[in-house]
Image (cartoon, helix red, strand yellow):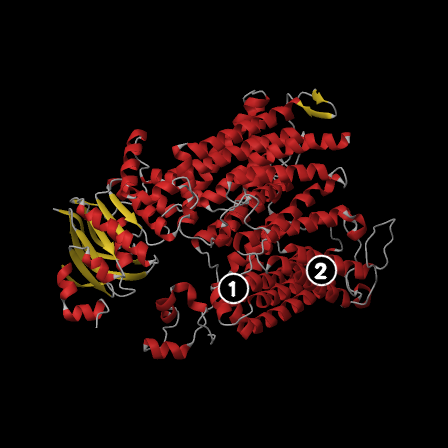
Amino acid sequence: MATLEAHEVIAGYGRTQIVHGISMEVDSGEVVCIVGPNGAGKSTFIKALAGALPVKGGIVRFQEIDITRLNQEIRARRGIGYVPQTQDVFPSLTTRENLAMGAYLCKKHELKIRQAAVLERFPQLKKVLASRAGSLSGGERKLLGIARVLMAEPKVLILDEPSAGLSPQYADIVRGHIRNLAHDGHTVLIVEQHAIEALEISDRAMVFVAGRKHFEGLAKDLLESEDLGQMFLGRR
Amino acid sequence: MSHYLYYALTLGVYFFVYCLLGLGYNLQYGLAGINNVANYSFVAFGAYLAAVTTLGPSNSLVQSYILGTSIAWPLPLLVGAAAGALTSLVLGFIFLLRLRHQYQAIVTLVVAQVIWLLVGNNPGLFNGYNGLAGVPQPLESVVNLAPVPYEAFFVGITALCALLGFAFMRRVVRSPLGRVLRAIREDESVASCFGRNVFWAQMSAFIVAGTMAGLAGGLLVEYLGAWSPSGWSPYEGFVVIAALIIGGTANNIGAALGAFIVPVAIYELTGFIPPFGPVNAQTIDAFRWIAIGIIVLLFLWFRPQGVLPEPRRRFRLVDRILVGQEPIPGKGLFLSQKMHGSDATSVVTDETK
Amino acid sequence: MSIFVASLGFGLVTSAILALAALGFTLQAGMTNVVNLAYGDMMTAGAFAALVGQSALRLSLWPALVFGGVIVALLSFVTNRLVIRPFVARGTKSFQMIIVTFALGIILQYVIVMKWGENFYAYRGLSLSLFKWGSFELSYEQLTIVIMSVLLLGGFHVLVRYSRMGRALRAMADDKQLARACGVNVARLTDIVWLISGALAGVSGVALAINAGSFNEIFGANFMLIVVAAAILGGAGEPNGAMVGAVVVGFAMEVSTVWIAGSYSEVVALILLIVAVLVRPQGLVAGRGKWVLAQ
């Protein structure tokens, strides 16, 4: 069953159209990775899925229900968890408050249970619970961004370039967490610049070029493909 | 009959004075993007200085003021213009160096209020809240005309000033400075990356605007014969802003049109509403301000660019090479829209229509 | 010395009123990024609403104050829905937004002129008895205003710091888009912000009128720049900062009258603001400077 489904989605900023009709499906429990050159419309596409940008054309379905016209907060309530590339935490709130914002719609006792579970998964956050998110390191912020979304127990997790701007060590940690999430049966849609590392933890992959889908298939096929590898993964 | 003619000529004076003010404000806000909410301090300084250099030495029994001299017309007007320029230069260091956006707007308002309070509370400066009165009209004894012809003569003076201002502004818009100012307005950091000194470019626009405001102030005080703090406030400045928004931001003809629509048509002509029943002079005045407020809101909603929008300036050669065809007149500039979004139109500038 | 102590008393009252007003102003600026130049006229509207409450509804002084707060809260809510929100949703530039609020203020002020003219009014039921403690003396109304202000500010602080809604408010001030992604109903919270800030404008307007003894159609607009000074001095958009800024500005204004003429006390406040903006634009309570960056 497709958890998240896009059909001929068109999106862009203002009058400028960037995504020219892309279709795709993410099934429950799989990790799907979108790669492609700069300006291919990857981020725009997932913003349209998450509701951060309006969908100009096409249909977005979530658990078989049309959500094309729903706004971002209702999509979030339905279970779409979206971690933007930057500005993924509330800088003036503490780590603890950020986590509480993630579970904004939960009851208080439920919040405690979820916070304990999320901290179990991200032990790095335990010692910075009382610090302002704005004072955290880039890696900690990214973990907090993901942790905040997990607090809502989303049915699909959409990550926009989670390793961008992180030190190599922290990028590895973040990828490790994503792999663990996949292991635990989470449904993940991920956009990545570090394509090879991202593909290694993905089940399926798509390549976007200039606002259109150029390739779709198993992640390991893309990794092994000669010409695609040369074009998009920087392999010689 | 001569009654109406006199009134029409009065409107003519206001029209040309507000043209001058509108052109100056257009330069600083429309072109240079300076967020000045309180543009009337410069008018006030121009008016005060023109007045004290006309009135002669201060007689503290009647009214006390500084710098009292009596110099030949049109020198007081030039002194007024210079006072506007100097005020701009000084205040420019406060407004333009570090402040941007909302902070800039608020500080202009605050500084204007400080000036207003200081002038009002210091009777020795320009006679405090009572203000200056008895300023003689220029060349009254020389031309020796009856009221209506003299009024026409004064309209001629203001028209001349406004035309000079218009011609000057036309040159500024097309000059390299005009291009730099538009570039700064669109994106300050990009402009400074190209080695443009943002501060001094904006400062020169600010000074030119201040000069024009000072000149307008000089004309106003010579026309009215009196000037006091009750005659200048942020609300007077709002009339100028409203005129530009309605006429057309960053368009000199729009500034003139706005000077006709707001201060003349709305502000003065509503004076013709006859008092009836509960309507008295005060409610008509209130009605006038409410009307201006509502019209400004309607324009900002339905036509934020004003009646006459900013003329599109483009670089035809680039259009032809990159887009492969001549731009369609009136269809806008697709090259820059494609490259940067519609707002960048005037950054890619060279040739005027 | 006794003049100094007396000026401290007045400083306390001025600060209390200023803190209420500045809190409302800074809420609008911080949460919705709108610098509302109609704020002073909303305070005036509160004072006149309380006057109506006294004359038409036969309310006594303090219920009339509450009535003023409620009316301006509704006025503020409607203003946001009808004018501010559509303009913000369209992405109107900050300077044009300022002109929008400027126009709103002028409209409001002259609507008041149409009904009440340019005259001075005063409330019924002002007692003239004084609370004395050495040379420190205040009228009972002034004392009540100070206590009311402390209670309201304390209540607001608790609300913002410890409640779920307060957390959402701070989150929204940080990043509206992300707050939406958390499932926060931003539009509803914005409505609440305009209600609260309107109520604060109304209440502070009535309090200011009580403290001054009389009021006219422009007294709120005249007070507004002082409110802005307190809000910015504390750090624009920072609720706690507004209170600190109000105390600094309020005391500076009143204590300065010991040395210089009272007509200059507003100049003192405004010059404080100019210096603060030039030297420390982030405010006394470290803000994030959201305003400066906002287009």
Q: Is residue B308 above or below residue B115?
A: below
Pointer 2 with pointer 1, Cβ within 8 A: no
Judging by the rendered image, the residue that carries numbered circle 2 is B46
Name the residue rendered at 15%, 46% in the picture.
Answer: A28
Closer-to-camera residue (B74/C28): C28
Q: Is residue A106 left or right of residue C85?
A: left
- B237, A102: nearer the viewer: A102
The chain ID associated with circle 1 is: B
- Residue sitting at 19 percent across and 58 percent down? A200
Image quadrant where residue A36 sits: bottom left
Instruction: Judge by depth and name the residue closer to the eye, B228 or C127.
Output: C127
Residue C122 seen anywhere in this rendered image of the structure: yes
Q: Is residue C232 left or right of residue B123?
A: left
Which amino acid type corresponds to the residue marked 1 in the rendered image? Answer: Ala
CA gap between label 2 and label 1 equals 24 Å
Circle 1: element type: loop
Mark 1, residue position: B250
Circle 2 SS class: helix
Three-letter amino acid code of the residue under disc 2: Gly
Percent coordinates x, y for residue B302 in the rendering: 43, 53
Mark 2 crowd level (few <14, some 14–19, many ≥20, 10 Å Cα): many
Disc nearer the start of the sequence (2/1): 2
**For the residue carrying disc 1, how many other residues have a C-alpha within 10 Å: few (<14), some (14-19), or many (20+)?**
many
Instruction: Tell me the number on the disc at residue C220.
Output: none
Q: Residue at x 70, y 67 (%)?
A: B157
Compared with C291, B34 (above or below) is below
